[in-house]
Image: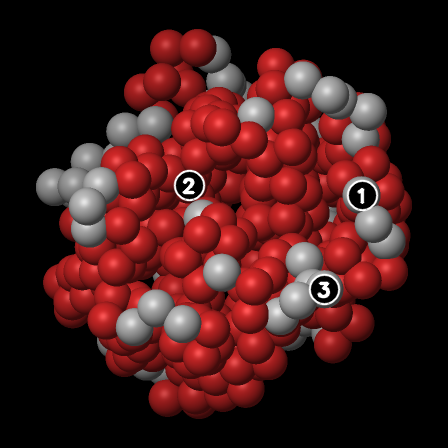
Amino acid sequence: MAEVRTTPVTRVSAGWMTLLALAQMGVIMAMTVGNQILLPSHVARIDPAHKEASLAAVFAVGAVCTIIANPLFGAMSDRTRSRFGRRRPWIVGGALACAASLTFLAWQESLAGLVAGWAVAQLAFTAALAAAIATVPDQVPIGQRGRVSALAGVGQLTGPLLGGVVATVLLTGAKAGFLAMAALILLLILPFGLFTREPAEPPDAAAEPAAGTATPLGARAFLRGLWVSPRRHPDFAWAWTSRLLITLTLAMAIGYLQYYLRDAVHYERLFPGSAVEQGVVVLVAVFTLSSVMPTLLAGWLSDRHGSRRPAVFAGGLTMAASGLVLTFLTSWTAAVAASVLLGAGYGMFAAVDQAMVTQLLPADADRAKDLGIVSLSNSASNTLGPVIAAPLVTSAGGYPLMYGVAAGFATLGACLIWRIRGVR
């Protein structure tokens, strides 16, 4: 029996969209500040002679945890039946676990402690974010998804700026930074999990699974569910691959940003009395401010014209241009210009790609799991980014070679968008 596809028709309110944006803002804020500021600083203090390799190890273990957690927590969310709904228990539980793991990290003084703490944090981040993202195809009509994704994208883009200011300007030290992120996680995520409602489950939701309902989750069924046939769902496969390449560019661009400013730009020599972490925050601010208008405009236009692919394509090419700037120029001015292009490009991409993907999911019954599979592309890029970047940075080509390779990935990812046929 063929699955009966269901699409929400009741528009969500501005308040609902705002709370979703704040929840995603909280998760991305803590993840990004940890990746860009807190962990690099802490690793450089613990192991200054091998900071690049040690940081790559921390990132890689955390990313592997995320790779496992994305589809697993998504599938568990799809099958959750409770008086609080399918998604809200995971959003609230993930927020609480996030705060606990960040608090644990605040007191770590060894590389092993950082690896373990960040791995748990990534699991918690993933649980909360996977469930929150799944509420979009659950509750948002297709004609509203561009705006919802754009507003959520603004939250994701402004979160790192807020967190960066808190961690480097208002506070000093890794301990205070981790504790502040833990508090902000609770403040930003819990309201969406506690004060929104989910659509009522059909009366037979807990009965024997029928066509279009999620099947029981076992190890074998879960592993089978991780494979989405590219032959049966080619659009889903092209969207996944395109996102992998474009987000790989972002991972490479920001993963070693602090070290780029310290070792290539010599930021602290250019600006005596300033710490390199402050330079990172400046670039994050430039990135964020450059992204807001392109994000909102791309989301609005994609809803208005019902067309998703052009914005994603333009965003990927703009991100490629950012990498090319740093391929040929190594200076503070070039870093600022690249941040403007990276912010504008990623804003356009983030605003529309998520909305596009929600229209390409293989099955309604497995929305969160399939979105988790899509998110594996982000996790894979976070894993592969340091692995690819580290040998490029330490080779004769150095940072220019690394950013040139990153630009190539973005260009290829943008071009693959045109292979998708299921959306305009």
Q: Position of residue 265 (x, y in %)?
A: 44, 63
Residue 409, by quadrant, is bottom left
| Residue 170 seen by the camera | yes
**Upstream in the sequence, badge 3 or badge 1?**
1
Q: Give the crowd class for mark 1: few <14, some 14-19, many >=20 residues within 10 Å.
A: few
- Residue occupied by mark 2: 382
Q: Residue at x 56, y 64 (%)?
A: 269
Side of 127 where 386 appears, left or right: left
Q: Position of residue 122 (x, y in %)?
A: 60, 32
Q: Residue at x 42, y 28 (%)?
A: 53
Q: Residue at x 61, y 57 (%)?
A: 276
The residue closer to the viewer here, 28 or 327, is: 327
Side of 31 where 356 appears, left or right: left
As shown in the figure, which amino acid type bears the numbered disc 3?
Answer: Gly
Q: Position of residue 28 (x, y in %)?
A: 62, 52
Please say if 204 is above or below 321.
Answer: above
- Residue occupied by mark 3: 273
As shown in the figure, which amino acid type bears the numbered disc 2?
Answer: Asn
The residue closer to the viewer here, 118 or 243, is: 118
State how far apart marks 3 and 2 are (Cα).
Answer: 32 Å
Please say if 364 is above or below 157.
Answer: above
State how far apart marks 1 and 2 are (Cα).
Answer: 25 Å
Q: What secondary structure is found at the residue carrying circle 3? A: loop
**Upstream in the sequence, badge 1 or badge 2?**
1
**Upstream in the sequence, badge 3 or badge 2?**
3
Please say if 68 is above or below 372.
Answer: above
Q: Give the crowd class for mark 3: few <14, some 14-19, many >=20 residues within 10 Å.
A: few
Observer-side mark, 1 or 2, equals 1
